[in-house]
Image (cartoon, helix red, strand yellow):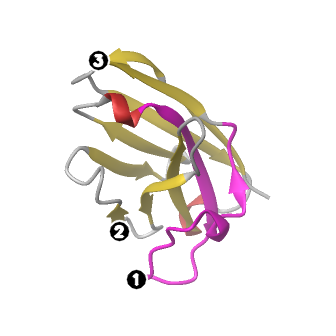
Amino acid sequence: QAQLVESGGGLVQAGDSLRLSCATSGRTFSGYDIGWFRQAPGKEREFVATIKGNGRTYYADSVRGRFTISRDNAKNTVYLQVNSLKPEDTAVYYCGARAGYSDIYYYTARSDYGYWGQGTQVTVSS
């Protein structure tokens, strides 16, 4: 069973950057797909980005070009570099993990992921 812990959130101004981390433990990390999602108050949890064990990545249209997901398998950690932050990026950011059964299919639904962290708050002021 995988355990995930997010960190790196905070209160920033519009245009600033943050690097969020998702540290994992448990089963073989390199075989997991890791996804980042976010949930703003009163809204559904939405997909942000995902990275496969082979390093392939996929992004939501709303963040493509501003956010970068990466992984360090030696540290069992996935990162989300978030640049040019906007007030509408304010949310709790969660990472999720699932076994990666496909080298090419990207999992973007909340229900695709069976393991979740507790989240890290990102607040962007204008």
Check disc 3 and report its element: helix, strand or loop: loop
Tell me the magenta residue range. 90-118
Q: Earlier in the sequence, mark 3 or mark 1?
A: 1
Whether 83 is drawn above or below 103: the answer is above
- Label 2, secondary structure: give it: loop
Identify the amino acid type marked 1. Ile
Q: Amino acid at mark 2?
A: Arg
Left or right of 24 in this view: 12: left
**Residue 93 horizontal/vertical position (percent):** 53, 39
Give the x, y percent position of residue 79. 43, 42
Viewer-nearest residue: 8 or 76 = 8
Up-down relation of residue 124 to residue 48 (above or below): above
At 45% from the left edge and 67% from the top edge, which residue is drawn? Answer: 52
Residue drawn 69% across the image and 37% down it: 118
* Sequence-wise first label, 3 or 2: 2
List the residue tagged with mark 3: 126
**Towards the viewer: 103 or 115:** 115
Write down the quadrant of residue 41 in the picture: top right
Query: Is 85 within the magenta?
Result: no
Would you call the spot at circle 1 few (<14 residues within 10 Å), some (14-19), or many (20 or more)?
few
Give the labeled residue for mark 2: 56
Above or below — where is 16 with respect to 55? above
Rendered residue at 35%/27% (across/down):
18
The x, y position of residue 113, in whole percent, is 65, 64
Q: Are marks 1 and 2 in contact (CB under 8 Å)?
A: yes
Q: Position of residue 125 (x, y in %)?
A: 35, 17
Is 11 placed above or below 121 here?
A: above
| Residue 8 can be seen in this image | no
Rounded to the nearest angstrom, the CA distance separating label 3 from label 2 is: 33 Å
